[in-house]
Amino acid sequence: MNKLTLFIKKNSSVKLRIFFRKTRWKFLYYYQSIVCFKFKKEYYCPVNRKKYRTFIKTKKLLLSPDLGARQRHRFIWHYLSENTNVLKINSKLLHISPEYCFYEKFRKQKNIEYFPVDKFEPGYDYLSLTKNFDLLGDDLPKHEYDFIICNHVLEHIIDDKTAINNIFSMLKTGGTAIVSVPILPNNQPTFEDFSIASPKERKKYFGQWDHVRYYGTDICRRFSDAGFDVKTIKSDDYFSGKELKTFGVSKESYLFELRKH
C-alpha cells in the first residue's frame, strides 16, 4: 500500500471512500464501454445479478460496476449460490475480513445471522457491522458457526496452522468453510521464507507487501491436517470457456470448500 493510499484510508470515513469509489466505477464503466465500443450487455455479475456492457479494467482487476466485485468474488459468489445452501437456510455466518460486495449482500439476507469481523488496526475504520477479531486468538468460540468465509487472509498470517485450526474449531459439526488464497501457477509448491520481512522483498517474492508466503495447491494438506474434508475448485474446471468470459473470471483461480464432519 503506497503512502497516499494509507493516508487517505486513515483520514477519511468508510462512507466517503465508498461514495467516491462508486462514482469512479460509474465513470470508468461508461467511459470504457464507449471507448471499447461495447454496447451489448454480454457480461454478467452473479453478485449483483446484473448484465453489463463490460467489466471495469483497473490495473490487473476486472470490477463489476455496482459493488466492485473482483474476478475471484464473482467466482466465489457463483459457487456459494449454486453449490451451497448458505443463501437458503437459517444459519450463522462468520465472515473474516469482509469484502464490501459480499458484506452488502449478506447483511440483507434475512435467513443469515451475520458476523463480519476483522483485525482492527489503529487509525482505520471498518464497515459498520464489523467487530474486532483475531483469528489467532485462544478464546474464540467453539462449534459456533454453520458457515465461515475467509478469503485472502491466510497469506497474511505467519502462524497459519493456528488460524486454520481455529476455523475448524469455530465451525459446527457439519459446517462448511469457504477459503481462498492467491495460488502459484503451474502447480508450484507453497513458498515461504520468514526471513523475508521487508515490504519490498515481500512484494517481490509473495506478490504483495504484507503477504508472508505464496501458496500452492498443496495448501490442501494444511486443511486436511486440521481435520477438514477438502474440495478444491479450479475456475477453468468449474466454468466453461464461454462462462469464464461472461462472468469475468480468470482461468487459474481457486477456492477451497472445507467441511467439518
Image (tube, rainbow, N blue to C red):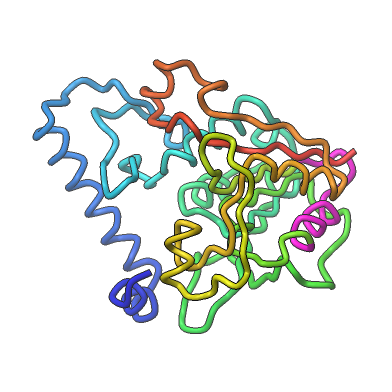
Q: Position of residue 161 (x, y in %)?
A: 77, 59
Q: Residue furthest bottom?
A: 122
Magenta part mainly helix, strand or loop? helix
Camera-side residue: 226 or 79?
Answer: 226
Quadrant for residue 257, please give it.
Answer: top right
Is 169 drawn above or below residue 183 in the view shown? below
Q: Is residue 169 left or right of residue 38?
A: right
Rendered image quadrant of residue 141 = bottom right
Question: Which image quarter holds the C terminus?
Answer: top right
Looking at the image, which is closer to me, 154 or 52? 154
Q: Which quadrant is home to the N terminus? A: bottom left
Relative image position of residue 135 (x, y in whole percent)? 71, 65
Q: Residue at x 34, y 76 (%)?
A: 12
Residue 42 occupies quadrant: top left
**Residue 5, above or below 242:** below
Q: Residue at x 54, y 30 (%)?
A: 78
Residue 166: in magenta span: yes
Which range is magenta? 162-176
Q: Is 132 drawn above or below residue 98 in the view shown?
A: below
